[in-house]
Amino acid sequence: MVDERGDAAWDSETDADRLRAPHVLVLGLGESGFAMARWCATHGCTLRLTDSRTSPPNRDAALALPSGVQGPHTFASAQADVVDSADTSAGQVHAFAPSLLDGGIDLVAISPGLSPLDPSVAMLLAAAHERDIPVWGELEFFARALRALRAAGQPSHVIAITGTNGKTTTTAMTGQLVARTGCTVAVAGNISPAMLTRLLDAIEQQSLPQVWVLELSSFQLETARTFEADAAAVLNVTQDHLDWHGGMDAYAAAKFRIFGAHTRPVINRDDARGAAWLAQWRGMQAEVAREAGTAPRRAATFGMGAPTLAGDFGLVEEGGLTWLAHVVRADGVDDVPPMAGLDPVRGVVVAPMPPETEADADAVVTSDVAEDGVADGDTADVDGHADLTDDVALSSTPTDPEASMALANETDAADVAETVLAEPVDSEDGKTPRRRRRKAFVEPEGMTKLLMPVDALRVRGLHNACNALAALALCRGIGLPLAPLLHGLREYRGEPHRVEVIATLEGVDYVDDSKATNVGATVAALDGLAAPTILIAGGDGKGQDFSPLLPAVARWCKAVMLIGRDGPQVRAAIESAGVVLEDHSTLQAAVDAAAAYAAPGDVVLLSPACASFDMFRGYAHRAAVFHECVAERAAAQGVML
């Protein structure tokens, strides 16, 4: 439903992608919507604002924007702000009436929380399409702004991360790793702050970062058309937000929109949809390479098993420990050029990156691999640099965990060997057939390097080890050295409400995973902790299929305490697991019952697999109540948390 053309309000030919839309309709005034309104106002646009809430969170600030916000505006039943032509029904104002496009709207800016399948939103988007008015989300504004900055000699590298689960942890982790190398970095997107807010602040402070690390939701990616990251990851794709997207296929398609034509993909090889996408992508790259006589572009993968191909990351059992591991080329070749400004001796970035030259851009071989539009001719790849020379040797079989914190070459470049194809090609005289000589890809031999033990991470669970592998692959994908990245991993402490151990009482760990609002997150927590568990689950199920919980519950759970509106649906899905199931009307009762079942070495895990709004104000409120319950138990034992 969302307009895919997206170019009418952008003059890339004459003015380096400067916004020239004089009149913008902003749909929704949450964090992202207000950021778009502020961005447009800063660039001289006049705005029309609409929100389905009577008092949206940024209403007054938006109305006070400096460009002179011009009506009409609609804020639900705030009649003073509603134009006469706005549609009404039974006394209610339609915040997304197609008539809001009247009066010369040139561009629609849509907030990520608004589903294009919502009937009222869909009507407005259809009307915009009929009038040839482009519809952009915040990510599209951001992508075009970065392109304009690049053209002005102020380039940045971009790392982007999406997935059903693990986005925030991996994004925060990646940002910390980038900073550990000495780069200036900005972390933004779904993780907050909004991308355009962070960009405006950086421009005003004249402190543009060398690297952007973006957490992107499927909502944000849905309206992206020209976004082009340097390295991007889809961590996993499981059921979530199906009501917003209309189905699993549409949801997955939005996730994989994160990969542009020049993006280095990072894929979870254990994820079925990720593996299928990667197989198709590799086939396309092989065909492009055969035609061009060059090595195919490479992706990096990560997973819980041992890595096998050069450039991949995984987990390896060695010496009684589980290790983060990486496959490098046995011949020591590394096709990932070091980031411009990198000191190869110190292993840190010491100077801003120079602007990309025309020669750099022309050196990149393009291919049509994105699912939808990509930025024409844009890339942050820089050719012509010497291979990174690492200053610390890395043993392939280390026994000392501290000694493993060292640097290893990433070497996932493709070898190319000359071969003769069988098909004849007409000679110049048109009579004598000859054979065309092309170059064929030969997978290079690899060597597994152990990087650091999983136990050296401060975050719990094998799923967090996989998040760490993804972060390493992304950072290496833009040419950052491995040694400081590994030190950064040791320092990362995790994010709140994501498999967060909040107390250990009488040998029982109490773990807050309130952010687990879908089935996949809870399965990941159970498998990642890999311990006897009393699970607290239930809430607003959002129409999910709970059956994928069954294997993990059967394997790890001693009992499950069920809460919330859809607790009965969870029960029905896991009844055959053969574990104790109890229904509780409050979280306090569930915690008390869980504690009664727990023995030393067990885990009491709040990982609801559901949203929280049936009982709480949000997942953070649910977590706060859980913390209070655990704190009361601790106080009764004379322990202060």
Image (cartoon, grey):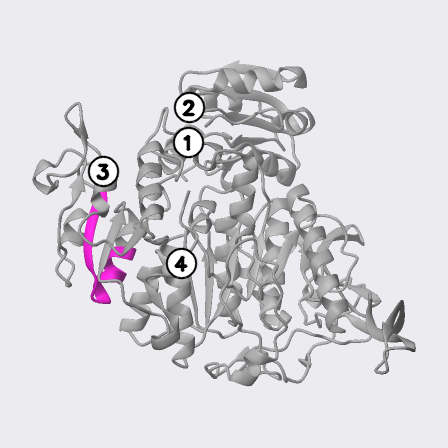
Does residue 450 appear anywhere in the picture?
Answer: no
Q: Quick one: 320 or 132, which is closer to the camera?
A: 132
The residue wearing badge 1 is: 626
Q: Which residue is more in the foreground, 453 or 564? A: 564
Answer with left or right where residue 226 lies relative to residue 527: left
Nearer to me, 637 or 126: 126
Mark toward the start of the polypeptide (1 vs 3):
3
Residues at circles 1 and 2 in contact by the CB criterion of under 8 Å? yes
Q: Disc 2 designates what residue?
A: 587
456 left or right of 589 in image: right
| N-terminal-most mark, 4 or 2 | 4
Q: Distance between the Cα atoms at labels 3 and 4?
A: 23 Å
* Span colored in magenta: 36-50
Q: CA distance from mark 1 to mark 4?
A: 39 Å
**Pointer 3 residue:** 95
- Up/down of 580 relative to 189, above or below: above
Secondary structure found at label 2: helix
Residue matched to label 4: 140
Do the residues under discs 1 and 4 have CB atoms within 8 angstroms? no
**SS of the residue under disc 3:** loop
The quarter of the rendered structure image containing the N terminus is: top left
